Amino acid sequence: MSHFHCKFLTTAFNPNGIVLFFYGILAICFVLSANLCVLSAFPLHQCKMKEMLRHLEHEIKKLNTSLKVDHIHYNPANIHQPVINTSMPIAKQNKSATCGLVYMEKALELIRDHQRNLIKDEDMEILFKEIITRLHRDIIPCANHNLAKCDNPHHPVFPGSHFKAKQWTRNFLEASVKFLHQIIHLLERPKRHE
């Protein structure tokens, strides 16, 4: 056996050699996974935001039905809701749209945590995960790129009592559908320079 082979075997099978070998494997795995993430992500300038928002709207309606809160009276005055003031300049409307999407993500996380404590429903857990992941990974980055970045998002405050929590959930989900329509309408406007 050559000197090189002996040296390799003694290095590879001593404790330090094994540790170095595994660090090397971990480094390769990290580089491969980072490259796969880059390859699987869509370019932000090509994201189809209207289609993503329509799909999100469908999922939120489905969530509203699944949570069985649609029988509760809708009263939008009960909560802070994301809304776009159309009398503002376009740049501020764009920022409001992105901030509203960030608010939606945080509110849905609160609703999910509340529901998780009440009922164990695997399908609902999956639906929450899909919606929140889509908002965080796809829609908000797309809005940051194509509309405006949100500097100071409003944070939702979830009520303590069970009935108020259900009422808040119902109002939030209804308001979210209307808000998504507003963003779609904003995206369909002809671009103007201000």
Image (cartoon, rainbow, N blue to C red):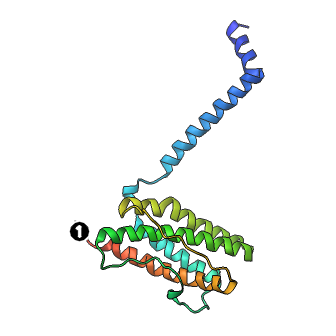
Residue 24 image offset from top left, x and y in percent:
64, 30
Please say if 32 is above or below 79: above
Q: Compared with residue 73, is residue 47 higher up or lower down, i.e. above or below?
A: above
Q: Quadrant of the C terminus?
A: bottom left
Q: Give the residue drawn at x 73%, y 21%.
A: 12
Q: Position of residue 164 (x, y in %)?
A: 64, 85
Where residue 90 sits, quadrant-wise, is bottom left
Find numbered disc 1 in the image and state the secondary structure of the residue it sits on: loop
Query: Disc 1 marks which residue?
Result: 192
Q: Quadrant of the N terminus?
A: top right
Location of residue 34 (image quadrant): top right
Task: Check the image and name the residue furthest to the left.
Answer: 193
Front residue (pair 152, 105): 152
The number of discs equals 1
Amino acid, disc 1: Arg
Q: Is residue 186 left or right of residue 41?
A: left
Q: Position of residue 192 (x, y in %)?
A: 23, 68
Residue 3 position, x and y percent, is 70, 7
Residue shown at 58%/79% (left/top)? Answer: 62
| Image side of residue 120 versus residue 126, left or right | right
Task: Identify which residue is drawn at 52% across, 48% down.
Answer: 37
In the image, what residue occupies the spot 61% across and 83% down? 65
| Residue 8 or residue 76, whichever sits in front | 76
